[in-house]
Amino acid sequence: MDTPAPRTALVTGATAGFGLAIARRLHAAGWQVIATGRRRERLDALQTELGERLHPACFDIRDADAQRAALEALPAGFRDIDLLVNNAGLALGTRPAQEAQLADWTTMIATNVTALATLTHALLPTMIRRRGAIVNISSVAGHYPYPGGNVYGGTKAFVSQFSLGLRSDLHGTGVRVTSIEPGMAETEFTLVRTHGDQAASDRLYAGAHPLRADDIAEAVHWIAHLPAHVNINRLELMPTTQSFAGFQVAREG
Ligand code: NDP
Ligand code: 8X3
């Protein structure tokens, strides 16, 4: 076992992609895991797979009352949370800002920003009491703009900067905070972003050797198992096949 004693992690968005892989990885290393998401059948399947060290908490993270109720309903043995992985999130839409749906923007802000901040606020006293760790899943999209990234990139810039701000405010508490900033990874992310276009998702990842959810899970596991005096502020990772392109210039006439 990797850990000296069972510790407890709360992983949001553990029904798919990164969150599911993180929940499995931490559980395999001996952690107790609280797994959240809206799809109850997937949480139930995860509990069947992992057993009693997995506590499923089914709620829409945008619903502050449901979030609070889920925390209040935690069994006694799952209340001492040592690691908060703020992973639940999404991109919606790939069109330029001037053609985007406002509803997509408000959903991204409610999920990636407001819900993440609300849950973090609720758990800060526990984090301080436990000298715990917070790992926020941001994105390269928070640092590097690209066409169609608009509000999604803005929400991830918030996540990255909020993480650094937390570091500053939590100075002296022993609480560690990390922002993980991945590039392209094959999950349900593009299926969600395109409102269910499986062919578009398949096209994007075909032959690209994108990151895998397990790569992110391994990073979270590494961060969670570092000695208490080491804080990774920011971790940016990309598939080898992904890099940067230049600025664009619109010419008149
Ligand atoms: P997936 O779509 O595979 O998984 C997203 C997870 O978030 C699901 O478990 C989903 O659960 C949960 N979620 C979304 N909305 C809500 C909600 N309203 N309430 C509760 N849970 C919600 O995507 P990824 O694993 O790729 O994404 C995880 C995080 O990583 C996101 O924050 C994303 O922005 C970020 N990211 C992804 C990258 C990529 O290329 N894949 C790269 C960089 C960052 P459910 O639907 O059951 O509610
Ligand atoms: C997801 C990575 O490059 O699709 O956050 O925005 S990207």
Image (spheres, rainbow, N blue to C red):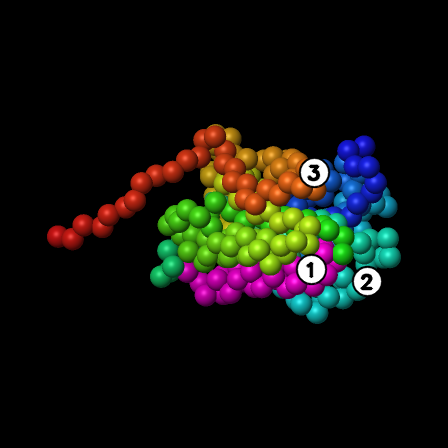
Of tags 2 and 1, which is closer to the observer? 1
Tag of residue 73:
2
Q: Position of residue 141 (x, y in %)?
A: 46, 48
Q: Position of residue 217 (x, y in %)?
A: 65, 38
Image point 38% across, 59% down: which residue?
A: 97
Tag of residue 187:
none
Per the image, the residue denoted by label 1 is 124
Q: Is residue 161 left or right of residue 178?
A: left
Query: Is residue 219 covered in magenta?
Result: no
Most extreme residue toward the bottom, as rendered?
65
Does the image show residue 110? Answer: yes
Earlier residue among tags 1 and 3: 1
Per the image, the residue denoted by label 3 is 227
Q: Nearer the viewer, residue 44 or 52?
A: 52
In the image, residue 13 sits, relative to residue 71, either above or below, namely above
Quadrant (top left/top right/bottom left/bottom right) for the N terminus:
top right
Q: Position of residue 70 (x, y in %)?
A: 76, 62
Earlier residue among tags 2 and 1: 2
Q: Position of residue 109 (x, y in %)?
A: 53, 62
Span colored in magenta = 100-128
Does the image show residue 213? Answer: no
Q: Are discs 3 and 2 less than 8 Å apart at CB?
A: no
Q: Nearer the viewer, residue 106 or 75?
A: 75
Image point 83% across, 40% down: which residue?
A: 5
Gap between marks 2 and 1 measured at Cα: 18 Å
Query: Is residue 119 covered in magenta?
Result: yes
Instruction: Bin the neighbour count of mark 1 within 10 Å (Cα to Cα): few under 14, some 14-19, many 20 and up.
Output: some
